[in-house]
């Protein structure tokens, strides 16, 4: 039996303290973005193009009046850029949004995020950290590079399963891969001579990015992330093992984009502790 007050699993309810905290987080975030010359955008709940960002099994799918496939918005990033470039045809390069996304079967995820056309990762991370500071959060920054995992797959016979589990027993059979698995701090990037050239180039990109930051960083070069659109360096902000924010670089129509999303509900939970 489903009672009249039941909420589908994955749905969110805010009241009293949490409703107030959610509004405060969103207001602080909007002020930071506006002070940094961002324009706000609110995209439709329905989209024809979510497969550009997510896998089919993650989508809540529907049909429009003409029987065409569409889905509830499962990701904001690609939709924002596609609409800005193709529909609005705006010259503005900095956009922010405060809106939920929806994943199969009934998961509601509130997000605060931004996309920067022709942006750089260091400016994106600095803005993300500023927002964390304004929200009185003190997370750890973790930096990874999705190209490194793809290159390891090309250069070795290591399975996806062993990469996902970061199987050190398997990694230890290859000297450079064993060393790669133990990279955690910027000092570990001082000597890159042991690595294959393609791996070295991607590690050098991480090294150059870190040199532009004044934030303590944890490096995880073999973190396995199955993204549809992030195609290079990406990062995550954690506090007490809770993921607060994630961002990175990707391309739409051969245009470089950087951006990040803050997971509002995780921030509420962290601040409410």
Image (cartoon, helix red, strand yellow):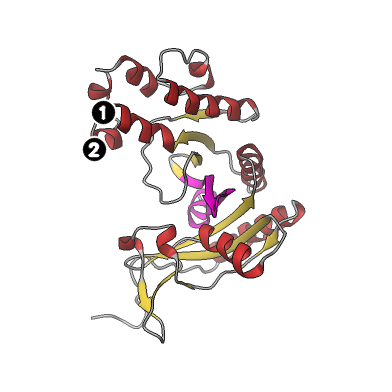
Q: Residue furthest bottom?
A: 65
Q: Are marks 1 and 2 in contact (CB under 8 Å)?
A: yes
Mark number, residue 265: none
Q: Residue furthest front?
A: 254
Seen at 46% across and 69% down, the residue is: 13
Is residue 7 in view from this perspective? no
What x and y, as percent, mark residue 216?
A: 58, 28
Kindly report the distance in space between the C-alpha atoms of the residues bearing marks 1 and 2. 9 Å
In magenta, the rendered stretch is 243-272
Is residue 146 in view from this perspective? yes
Task: Identify the secondary structure beneath mark 2.
Answer: helix
What x and y, as percent, mark residue 143?
A: 50, 34
Task: Identify the secondary structure beneath mark 1.
Answer: loop
- Vertical position of residue 55 compared to residue 68: above or below: above
Disc 2 packing (10 Å; few <14; some 14–19; many ≥20): few
- The magenta stretch spans residue 185: no
Judging by the rendered image, the residue that carries numbered circle 2 is 161
* Image quadrant where residue 163 sits: top left
- Vertical position of residue 66 compared to residue 196: above or below: below
């Amino acid at each position: 039996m489903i009672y009249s007050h039941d909420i589908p699993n994955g749905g969110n309810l805010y009241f009293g303290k949490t409703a107030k905290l959610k509004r405060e987080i969103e207001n602080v975030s909007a002020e930071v973005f506006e002070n940094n010359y961002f324009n706000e955008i609110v995209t439709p709940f329905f989209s024809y193009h979510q497969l550009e960002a997510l896998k089919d099994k993650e989508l809540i799918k529907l049909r429009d009046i003409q029987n065409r496939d569409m889905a509830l918005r499962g990701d904001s990033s690609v939709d924002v850029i596609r609409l800005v470039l193709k529909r609005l045809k705006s010259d503005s390069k900095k956009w922010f949004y405060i809106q939920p996304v929806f994943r199969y079967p009934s998961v509601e995820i509130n997000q605060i995020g931004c996309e920067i056309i022709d942006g750089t990762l260091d400016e994106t991370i600095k803005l993300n950290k500023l927002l964390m500071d304004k929200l009185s959060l003190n997370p750890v920054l973790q930096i990874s590079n999705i190209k490194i995992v793809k290159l390891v797959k090309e250069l070795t016979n290591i399975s996806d399963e062993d990469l996902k589990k970061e199987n050190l027993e398997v990694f230890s059979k290859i000297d450079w891969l064993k060393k790669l698995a133990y990279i955690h701090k910027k000092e570990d990037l001082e000597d890159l001579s042991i690595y294959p050239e393609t791996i070295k180039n991607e590690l050098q990109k991480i090294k150059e990015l870190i040199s532009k930051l004044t934030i303590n960083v944890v490096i995880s070069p073999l973190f396995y992330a199955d993204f549809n659109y992030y195609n290079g360096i990406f990062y995550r902000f954690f506090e007490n093992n809770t993921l607060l924010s994630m961002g990175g670089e990707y391309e739409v129509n051969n245009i470089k984009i950087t951006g990040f999303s803050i997971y509002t509900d995780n921030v509420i939970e962290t601040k409410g502790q």
